[in-house]
Amino acid sequence: MVKYLVIAGGLLMSAAAYSQADSAAFYQQKGNAEKQARRYKEAEKNFLKASQFDPKNTAVQIDLAAVLQEMNRYAEAREKLLAVERADPNNLTVVENLADLSVNMRKWEDLIRLADRMKQLGSKKSNNFYLAKAHYELEHYGDALKYCELAFKDDPNKAETPYIAARAFIEMSNYKRAAGCYEQAIERDTSNARWMYEAGLAYYAIPDDKKAIYWFERAGAKGYKKTNDYLENLGNAYLNTGQFNKGMEIMDQMLKNRPGDKELMYTIGEAYYKAGKFQDAINMWDRIFTIDPKNANALFMIGMAYMKKGEKEKGQQLCDKAIELDPGLARQRTEKKMPNGL
């Protein structure tokens, strides 16, 4: 009799287990249907019910984490997946999803660990790209470039790979290499106006003002916002290439936007001076001196401009007065150099 009771009890336990598994599968299926319909909150409720019926079901936890990601609840999704990874460290889907979350959450050390794990598990995703991105963000620029090269071999069409390389070269002040990488990135993403502007900045830093103008103009045409910084860089590049009228048109517009900006006034005065428009330079620097009567640089340059105009005595007196305010200017007069800004 006892034997029959034991058998009956076992059958009941087995039936309960099957019932729980069936319930978990039912709610998981329902959750996926809600997820497909983009009803993420309802999907979450069903996945939680499925999890209650079968707490060790890895697939349910992965589905739950996915729907949490859809609701931008990245930290919760990550905790769910980390728990699954501890129980099943060889689950490639979990490792790959955790890597994606690490990018979203900027957890770069974690991303390095997960990318290495992906490689061990034979992932077809570009773990080298993940490593390039993580090392760049951690300011390991040499390692970032090493993995960019490998990631480029994995997928030569991925635009962000040469972009990361460009940024790494910029951080190391290697502007020529950076400019080349920017062009590779833009070849693969021809609509990215921000990258075009950054390419212009790289060429401006080389300096290669003609190429800088090319990329600044392309960025503007693609919709890059024409901020004061954008206009100033483009205007200076025009001036540096002798396109005086274009450069001054931009500078005048900027001065309307920033009427009290002494540094901008100084730059405009300098452009007039270099172009031989000495009275215009005097008028501009005089505006600085009106705002700041102790500005020795502006006064000195007014004096230099007068001397260039042929009014040497007046110019000499103004330069002497500027040197009284700032004795360091005497050396620049001797060397016939312009003062370094304000």
Image (cartoon, rainbow, N blue to C red):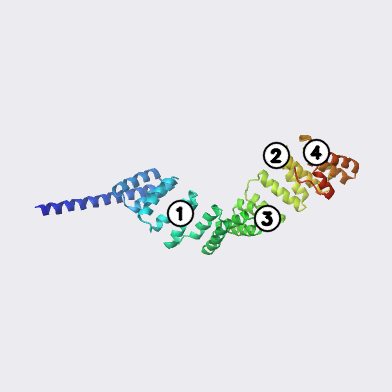
Mark closer to the chain start, 1 or 4:
1
Mark closer to the chain start, 2 or 3:
3
The span from disc 1 to disc 2 (Cα, nearest Å) is: 45 Å
**44 left or right of 332 in image:** left
Q: Is residue 208 above or below residue 333?
A: below
Instruction: Kindly identify the amino acid type of the residue bearing the numbered disc 3.
Output: Tyr
Q: Residues within 10 Å of mark 4 (few under 14, many from 20)?
A: some
The residue that mark 1 highlights is 99
**In this orientation, which residue lies closer to the viewer: 309 or 46?**
309
The residue that mark 2 highlights is 257
**In this orientation, which residue lies closer to the viewer: 179 or 158?**
179
The span from disc 3 to disc 1 (Cα, nearest Å) is: 35 Å
Mark closer to the chain start, 1 or 2:
1
The span from disc 2 to disc 3 (Cα, nearest Å) is: 26 Å
Instruction: Kindly identify the amino acid type of the residue bearing the numbered disc 2.
Output: Asn
Mark closer to the chain start, 4 or 2:
2
The residue that mark 4 highlights is 325
Q: Tell me what residue is drawn at x 69 percent, y 46 percent.
A: 231
Front: mark 4 or 2: 4
